[in-house]
Amino acid sequence: MEASAPANVRPSSVSKHSLNRGLSTETVLNYLRTRLPRLYALAEVVGKWVWLDVSPARKPYLAKLLWTLGFHWNQRRHVWQHPCGSFNPLGSHPQDPRAKYRSFFPADVLPA
């Protein structure tokens, strides 16, 4: 159950949102790490997707930014999700995808 664009999003950012949904997992994580390090610390990779557990209601500007970056709010799971180029608009995961796909927090992985 995806939400539509946040109320404060300009129509011109709709095309950016669509384009940015195709960014790779590495590109999304690098953007978060370099430009939004507090969000990078919260980022969870589930399969190829990036999830952020940040409430959109408390930070409307952040909601606009995340949506423009290609994230969408998943009402059922209460997380921002970025498909990182791997999405099926007709697909559905009735169970938690973490049970099917590998899940980890990149900020917790120490460099070798």
Image: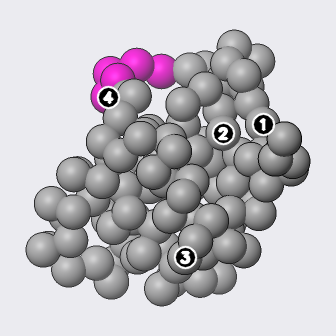
The residue labelled by disc 3 is 35
Q: Position of residue 100 (x, y in %)?
A: 69, 14
Look at the numbered disc 2 and give the secondary structure of its residue. Answer: strand
Q: Residue at x 20, y 80 (%)?
A: 10
Taking the image as drawn, is residue 67 in sight? yes
Relative placement, left or right, of 30 versus 79 is left
Q: Earlier in the sequence, mark 4 or mark 3?
A: 3
Q: Is residue 37 above or below residue 76?
A: below
Q: Estimate the spatial distance between the alpha carbons at disc 4 and disc 2, rounded to whole Å.
A: 19 Å
- Label 3 neighbourhood size at 10 Å, few (<14), some (14-19), many (20+)? few
Are discs 2 and 1 less than 8 Å apart at CB? yes
Element type at mark 1: strand
How many numbered marks appear? 4
**Do tag 3 and tag 1 residues touch (Cβ < 8 Å)?**
no
Whether residue 53 can be seen here: no
Q: Reading the chain from its start, which is encountered first: label 3 or label 1?
A: 3
Q: Nearer the viewer, mark 1 or mark 4?
A: 1
Q: Which mark is residue 81?
A: none
Measured from the top left, where is residue 46 in percent x and y?
Answer: 65, 32
Residue drawn at the location 40% of the way across and 19% of the way down: 91
Separation of disc 4 and disc 3 at Cα?
A: 29 Å
User: Which residue lies under the disc numbered 4?
Assistant: 89
Q: Nearer the viewer, residue 81 or 27?
A: 27
Q: Disc number at residue 104?
A: 1
The structure's colour scheme is one colour
Please tell me which of labels 2 and 1 falls first in the chain.
Answer: 2
